[in-house]
């Protein structure tokens, strides 16, 4: 046997077989390392017959489309919301420039801002309603987002912001000076 004090001499020590120790006696017909291969067994159960479904896209024929929960509809409304949010921020900044340029009481411009935002919310709701009637009911299509309604609202809000800037005298004179040079 090798000297175990040297690290390079470390190895597995072989032990000679001993009588009575090792593999226990096995059943008859068993040979070590050989698996018995026989005829395949018949299945224990009988499979169910397959029923064909007509492809309608909504389930079984004649069954109404499943109702979607409110959380699913709210998640739809959020998709595309960045368009309305950015345009709303632009309109708010333009309103602020217009309101502060007036150098008067801010109650009138504040009322204009609130009414303008209510009109934008109404335009969004109207766009969603028209999309529901036309796309879902007439064409039978499922809407997965509110990007169209948000885009229509964003166009309105950007136009509103530009209109407020056009009513500000120093912005118009600065624009004319830039465009003339």
Image (tube, helix red, strand yellow):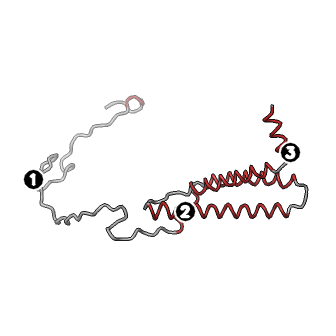
How many numbered markers are drawn?
3
Q: Nearer the viewer, residue 88 or 138?
A: 138
Secondary structure under badge 3? helix
Return the residue at label 2.
130
Q: Which residue is mark 1?
A: 38
Query: Which of marks 2 and 3 precedes in the sequence?
Result: 2
3 and 2 marks in contact (CB < 8 Å): no
**Residue closer to the observer: 168 or 64:** 168
- First-in-chain label (3 vs 1): 1
- For label 1, the SS is loop
Residue drawn at point x = 63 percent, y = 52 percent:
83
The residue that mark 3 highlights is 170
Question: Which residue is pictured at 83% across the width and 40% down the height?
Answer: 174
Please state the horizontal and vertical placement of residue 105, each as a whole percent of the image.
89, 61
What residue is rendered at 73% in x and 51% in y? Answer: 90
Say which quarter of the image contains residue 17: top left
Find the distance from the CA under tag 3 to the CA under tag 1.
97 Å
């Amino acid at each position: 046997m090798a000297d175990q004090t040297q690290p390079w001499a470390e190895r597995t020590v072989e032990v000679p077989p001993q009588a009575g120790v090792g593999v226990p006696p096995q059943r008859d017909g068993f040979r070590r390392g050989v698996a018995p291969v026989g005829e395949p067994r018949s299945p224990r159960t009988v499979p169910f017959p397959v029923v064909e479904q007509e492809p309608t896209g909504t389930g079984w024929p004649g069954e109404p489309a499943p109702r979607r929960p409110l959380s699913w509809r709210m998640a739809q409304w959020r998709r595309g919301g960045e368009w309305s949010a950015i345009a709303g921020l632009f309109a708010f900044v333009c309103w602020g420039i217009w309101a502060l340029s007036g150098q008067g009481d801010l109650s009138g411009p504040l009322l204009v801002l609130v009414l303008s935002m209510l009109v934008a919310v109404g335009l969004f709701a109207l766009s969603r309603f028209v999309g529901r009637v036309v796309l879902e009911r007439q064409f039978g299509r499922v809407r997965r987002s509110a990007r169209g309604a948000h885009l229509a609202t964003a166009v309105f809000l950007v136009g509103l912001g530009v209109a407020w800037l056009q009513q500000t005298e120093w912005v118009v004179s600065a624009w004319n000076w830039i465009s003339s040079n």
